[in-house]
Amino acid sequence: MNRLIPLLAVWLVVAALMMAAPAWAQAPAPAPASATTEQVEPQNLSVRLEPQQVRIGDPFVYEVVITHPKDHRYELKVPQETGDFEFLDQTRQRQDGPDSATTTFRVRMSAFALGSVAVPALPFDVATPEGPKAFTVPGRTVDVTSTLPPDAEGQGADLFDYKPPEEVPIRSWRLVLTVLGVLAAALLAWVLFRWWRNRPKHVEVVPVLPLDVRTRKALDALKAEDLPSRGRVKDFYFRLSEIIRGYLGERYGFEALECTSSELMASLRRLSTPGLPEDKLMRFVSESDMVKYARADASADACRDALAFGYSLIDTTYVPPPPPQASDNAAAPRVQ
């Protein structure tokens, strides 16, 4: 029960506000303050239309000459709503006399309605010592005639109203030139791409080291890794077997890396291999196969002896190629 009392109070307050809302909405808004400006009359006013009769669309001049005290200044305000008229431009000229001043306004405008058309009234802002005031020149009428000759209707010519600007198609080669330019750019890009792909490439030719030097470098690198001391005896024999087989294949001219052990020995026996230690090679090949494929173990001394066999194989079998012979040269001195 104690909880319902606050809820009932809130509901009553909301209901009272909802009932009072229409009264607030119907309350009238305060009226805006009046902003009228006091009117002033000049000493003299002269208005002239030049010409009195004008053809539709042609400009004419609305001249207003105002004579006023010297301490007054008149400024023309162009009306926002000009109806059937268009204000083109205006000029203002003032001449001060001994007791008064004369300000001349020349307003150029054009009419777009036929018949006797009333020119809009011209409002002026007047600055006086007493404060800003206003003055309005009542509108005049101007006779607007047609641009067609008097017998135009009899000849079948009609006076149509002004129309907004329309887009007139003009033959242009811009699209064709644009397409040709795009095709030329694509062709140029294709030619440059083909030239770039087929351009002569500068390849630096590194001289190939002799076979014995390359093989010794490979053995030195294998020795520096010291694989047996790290428990990688099988990797050691794989690497050493590839180095020795590669040396034998390049030295005697056959594919030694793809041969089995029996094919390797049979190929060497068919070739001329002066100085080749066949027994030591056969022993190395058997020991290498046992370690690589039969998971046999090899001691550190055995690994060291196998590496030494690789060095000794180069010493006993490698024969340096003969130096290139100089070709006959007519400029060389002849021996008598």
Image: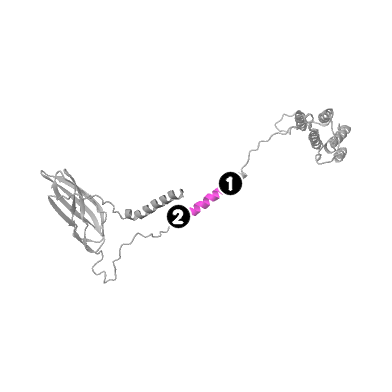
Quarter holding the C terminus is top right
Residue appearing at x 46%, y 55% in the figure: 175
The amino acid at mark 2 is Arg
How crowded pointer 1 is (Cα within 10 Å; few <14, some 14-19, many 20+) is rated as few
The label on residue 289 is none
Prevailing secondary structure class for the magenta stretch in the rendered image:
helix
Depth check, front residue: 289 or 198: 289
How crowded pointer 2 is (Cα within 10 Å; few <14, some 14-19, many 20+) is rated as few
Q: Is residue 58 visible?
A: no
User: Is 151 displayed left or right of 194 in the figure?
Assistant: left
The amino acid at mark 1 is Phe
Residue appearing at x 61%, y 45% in the figure: 197
- Compute the Cα span from label 2 to label 1: 28 Å
Q: Residue furthest right?
A: 279
Q: Position of residue 161 (x, y in %)?
A: 30, 64
The residue wearing badge 2 is 174
Secondary structure state at the residue bearing disc 2: helix
Q: How many marks?
A: 2
User: Is 226 displayed left or right of 11 in the figure?
Assistant: right
Secondary structure state at the residue bearing disc 1: helix
**Rendered position, 269 above or below 333:** below
Q: Which residues are magenta?
A: 173-190
Q: Position of residue 271 (x, y in %)?
A: 86, 38
The residue wearing badge 1 is 193
